Image: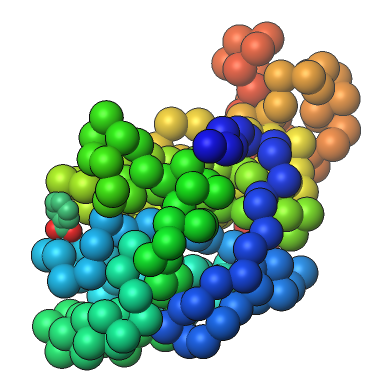
C-alpha cells in the first residue's frame, strides 16, 4: 500500500470513468488538479458533495484546476447515480467520476483506511500542482461532507504561495493581508513588497495580497 505525502509525485493512472477511459496526467495537462474520493454510489452525503462540486466547477476552471472524483462502484452504477445527482441537486455533473471497482486508484492513493471501513474509501482530497507534485492532502470520514468553499480557499492559498514569497494566515481569504515568508529578512521584504510591510513582531510581518492591484 502506498503512502503519499506532500511534495511526492502524484501517482499517474489510467482508469474507467463516467466519461470513458482517462489517463490522469493527460487529463490534467499543464494545469492544477483535484482528486477526491467518495465512499460509494447512491449515498446521501456523496450525492450532495458531487452536486456541490458540479456547481463549483466554474470557480475551479477560473483557477485552472481540473476536478476528478472517485467512487468504488462501476461505470454503469455511476451513470444511474449521476441521473439522481443531477435531479436532486439541480445540476449537471460536468467532470469525470472514476469507476474504481478493482480499488486500483484507491490503493494507489491510500484512500481505504481499514480501521474506518474495510472496503469503502474515506473522503480523501489530493490537490496536484502543474509539476504533478502533491500540494495538499485532506482526509474526512464518510460521515462528514467536505466544504467546497474551503477547497477553493486552499487553492487560492496554494497558487498565491507558489508564485510569491508569502504564506496565508488563519482563516485567510483571497485579497486579505498575507504573511511574509519567515526566511526573508524584513529589510529585504520591504524591497520585495512595494505595498509595504507591517512588522508586528520580527517573525510576524504582514503585507497586502501581492496579486491585488
Ligand atoms: C454518505 O455519503 O452519505 C455516506 C457514505 C458512507 C457512510 C456514511 C455516509
Give percent across and percent down for residue 82. Answer: 26, 84
Residue occupying the far front of the picture: 102
Q: Which quadrant holds residue 89?
A: bottom left
Indicate which quadrant contains ligand 1: bottom left
Give the percent coordinates (x, y) of residue 133. 71, 47
- Let me know if residue 65 appears in the view: yes
Q: Nearer the viewer, residue 63 or 77?
A: 77
Looking at the image, how many numbered discs can be counted on the residues? 0
Vertical order, 87 against 193 (above or below): below
Residue 185 as seen in the image, left or right of residue 125: right
104 sits left or right of 135 in the view:
left
Give the answer, above or below, for where 162 lies relative to 171.
below
Q: Would you identify the image quadrant in which residue 140 lies?
A: top left
Q: Residue at x 69, y 37 (%)?
A: 7
- Horizontal side of residue 93 vs 183, given as left or right: left
Image spot of residue 135 (x, y percent): 62, 44
State the residue at coordinates (27%, 41%). 118
The answer to whether residue 82 shows anywhere in this view is no
Q: Quadrant of the C terminus?
A: bottom right
- Picture residue at 24% right of the left edge, 35% below the top: 116
The reply, left or right, for residue 205 in relation to residue 109 is: right
Q: How is the image coloured?
A: rainbow
Instruction: Report the residue at 81% width, 22% height from top.
Output: 184
Relative to residue 202, is residue 33 depicted above or below?
A: below
Q: Position of residue 113 (x, y in %)?
A: 34, 37
Amino acid at each position: 500500500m502506498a503512502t503519499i505525502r506532500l511534495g511526492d509525485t502524484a501517482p499517474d493512472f489510467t482508469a474507467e470513468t463516467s466519461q470513458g477511459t482517462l489517463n490522469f496526467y493527460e487529463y490534467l495537462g499543464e494545469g492544477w488538479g483535484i482528486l477526491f474520493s467518495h465512499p460509494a454510489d447512491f449515498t446521501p452525503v456523496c450525492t450532495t458533495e458531487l452536486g456541490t462540486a458540479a456547481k463549483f466547477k466554474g470557480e475551479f476552471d477560473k483557477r485552472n484546476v481540473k476536478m476528478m472524483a472517485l467512487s468504488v462502484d462501476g461505470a454503469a452504477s455511476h451513470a444511474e447515480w449521476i441521473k439522481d445527482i443531477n435531479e436532486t441537486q439541480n445540476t449537471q455533473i460536468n467532470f469525470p467520476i472514476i469507476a474504481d471497482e478493482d480499488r486500483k486508484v484507491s490503493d494507489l492513493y491510500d484512500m481505504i483506511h481499514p480501521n474506518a471501513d474495510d472496503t469503502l474509501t474515506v473522503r480523501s482530497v489530493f490537490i496536484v500542482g502543474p509539476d504533478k507534485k502533491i500540494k495538499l492532502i485532506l482526509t474526512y470520514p464518510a460521515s462528514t461532507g467536505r466544504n467546497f468553499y474551503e477547497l477553493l480557499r486552499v487553492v487560492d492559498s496554494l497558487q498565491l504561495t507558489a508564485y510569491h514569497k508569502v504564506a496565508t494566515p488563519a482563516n485567510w481569504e483571497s485579497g486579505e493581508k498575507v504573511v511574509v515568508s519567515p526566511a526573508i529578512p524584513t529589510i529585504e521584504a520591504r524591497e520585495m513588497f512595494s505595498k509595504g510591510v507591517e512588522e508586528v513582531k520580527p517573525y510576524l510581518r504582514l503585507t497586502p495580497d501581492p496579486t491585488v492591484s
